Image: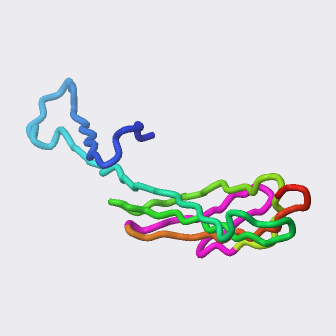
Amino acid sequence: MVDAGTSGSTLTNTASVAAADQADPVAANNSAAKSVAVQSADLSVSLLVDDGTPNEGDTVTFTVTVANAGPDAASGIALADALPAGLTFTAAAPSQGSYVEGTGLWTIGSLASGSSATLQLQAVVDAGTS
């Protein structure tokens, strides 16, 4: 597991022979090192609604955008966006991945550095909530 706070860093693991009972004629090959570059992705979320003051029975559309400002690609991205009480879900249109109405989970997958994905959620305003 990579520790929190190490994103963007290069971590190097070095293994070396610490002891041996026999003489070693080639001491130059008694250690090895391998580095890993810890990826870093700056994800941001924005949320818009097409009608901030709807009436009962009106359909509203929310647009959620997830953007990756990098510097690296991001993978395994999922976002939770469950609609609140007072709205009845009617449709979802993700630009990539899938949305599950019951959990509100949008499984996005991967985003390259500099790219974004959007989810449009449509809902009807329930009676007695406006």
Q: Which of 66 and 128 is in front in this view?
A: 128
> What range of the chain is rendered magenta?
93-113
Find residue 107 and report its horizontal and vertical position in percent.
63, 62
Q: Which residue is rendered at x = 15% and y = 43% of the image?
A: 29
Q: Nearer the viewer, residue 15 or 77?
A: 77
What's the coloring here? rainbow
Snapshot quadrant of residue 94: bottom right
Q: Which residue is rendered at x = 37% and y = 53% of the image?
A: 40
As for residue 104 lying within the magenta part, the answer is yes
Q: Which of 14 and 95 is in front in this view?
A: 95
Question: In the rendered image of this protein, does residue 10 appear above or below residue 70?
Answer: above
Snapshot quadrant of residue 51: bottom right
Find residue 108 and report its horizontal and vertical position in percent.
58, 65
Q: Which of 9 and 88 is in front in this view?
A: 88
Find residue 21 and report its horizontal and vertical position in percent.
20, 24
Q: Which residue is rendered at x = 72% and y = 71% of the image?
A: 92
As for residue 96 lying within the magenta part, the answer is yes
Residue 24 appears left or right of 128: left
**Residue extending furthest right?**
127
Question: In the rendered image of this protein, does residue 29 appear above or below residue 112?
Answer: above
- Of the 4 image quadrants, the one containing the C terminus is bottom right
What number of labels is visible?
A: 0
- Of the 4 image quadrants, the one containing the N terminus is top left
Q: Which residue is rendered at x = 73% and y = 55% of the image?
A: 82
